[in-house]
Amino acid sequence: MSNDNEKESFSRRGFLGMGSAALAAAGMLKATDATGQDQKPYPAKGDRSSSAPGPGNPPIDEQNPDSFLPPSTDAGGVPTFKYPFGLSHKRMQEGGWSREVTVRELSVSKSIAGVDMRLTAGGVRELHWHTAGEWAIMLYGNARITGLDAEGKGFVTDVTEGDLWYFPTGIPHSIQGLNPDGCEFLLVFDDGNFSEYETVLLTDWMAHTPHDVLAANFGVNAEAMEKMVRREKFIFQAAVPGPLADDQKASAGNRGLSAQDFAFRKSQMKVVKRTRGGEVTIVDSSTFKVSTTIAAAIVTVRPGGIRELHWHPNADEWQYYISGKGRMTVFATGGRARTMDFQAGDVGYVQKTLPHYVQNTGNTDLKFLEMFKSGSYQDLALSEWLSHAPPELVIAHLGIDRATLDAIPKDEPVIMPE
């Protein structure tokens, strides 16, 4: 994204429709197995060669047309880069639920993991912390988040749809749903091996500490500790909290409230690129100061638009599709390429430096997140690469004429059409 102001704000930068057996085979295919897989002549839709008269799952095939009949430009074995949250195990609790997509569900996703969580009004994600940094976006409703900064000062605020938060590794925090209907949010962690089953929970810690030790630690009677919980709560139902000001006053204590703002409001976000094809907002440590290990782009592609051919030189890309329908082709080394289809609730993944594009295939806006394990957002576009190379060199490579080359955008449009 190459406007001058934009350069200052960030660096310059199948599974569904294939069946489980086919998925496993595709996921394990080595790069050395990719040669010799071109299919010529390529069958068209409706041809006898592309028919599948055996057992199948038509609804899944309809959601994944580019897996059922791949484009003729696809070639070789590219590992699966899609997993829908709808297939993840949902951990049900009174007060809400959670489900995750980690490297165990999506083997290519080694740097980032995601959790989709729902809390009722009053539902609590108990006091806890992680061994990974936590970035979050509110997908629905309202919530109250609390934390304790590295100086031992409390933090309490309310967040609503579109707002973000970030808690660094080891910073204790909690989340609670508010009226009228609680909340749902996406959590993104800077470790593909992360799991919600492996967090440090307050209740779990207390349950595994002898009561006489707790009594000595808190300076209270040992008998008072007998009522202490004896197992983790994780998510539980409680009363809806009262006014925010009351909780902030209580959290301030003798030290005062934290000067660190762990939340980032939707109103603080600025669109850094807008075209006829859509718009993109960048949120990284240059604007959301506390988010030092995760950068994000919030992308909207209009019907008929395309998130242009590009790549990211500094980090893998973890995607979450919020609304609409789209497809993405990922180009890998060795002349390999694969196309997969996405809709709301799906997770996508692109390894660092691999070229790709995302195309809106529906009749409504396609909105998705691009997430990176990095403090800064970086990308490079094919159009800006070609426009900054010697013209005759590009023409010699591609066999196009000068008029066609001149028509290519001179800067990075991000989303086409401009």
Image: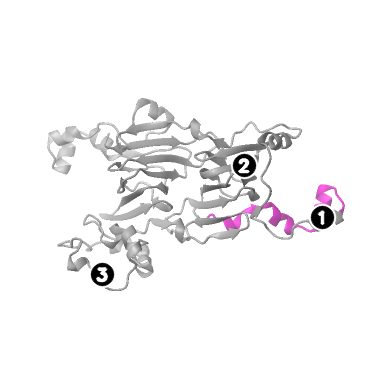
Q: Which residue is mark 2?
A: 145
Q: Amino acid at mark 2?
A: Ile
Label 3 and label 1: CA atoms lie apart by 65 Å
| 415 with respect to 186 (left or right) | left
Q: Nearer the viewer, residue 346 or 188?
A: 346
Query: Whole-percent x and y of residue 45?
Result: 20, 61
Mark 3 element type: loop
Marks 2 and 3 in Cβ contact (< 8 Å): no
Q: Is residue 17 visible?
A: no
Mark 2 element type: strand
Q: Nearer the viewer, residue 6 or 126?
A: 126
Label 2 and label 3: CA atoms lie apart by 51 Å
Query: Whole-percent x and y of residue 76?
Result: 27, 60
Label 2 and label 1: CA atoms lie apart by 27 Å
Image point (51%, 62%), residue name: 89
Q: Earlier in the sequence, mark 2 or mark 3?
A: 3
Q: Which residue is mark 1?
A: 225
Q: Nearer the viewer, residue 121 or 92?
A: 121
Q: Is residue 163 visible?
A: yes
Q: Which mark is residue 52?
A: 3
- Which residues make up the magenta segment? 194-221
Q: Is residue 307 above or below residue 215?
A: above
3 or 1: mark nearer the eye: 3
Q: Main secondary structure of the magenta part?
A: helix
Where is residue 44, by image quadrant?
bottom left
Q: Earlier in the sequence, mark 2 or mark 1?
A: 2
Magenta stretch encompasses residue 147: no
| 346 with respect to 403 (left or right) | right
Query: Whole-percent x and y of residue 394?
Result: 18, 38
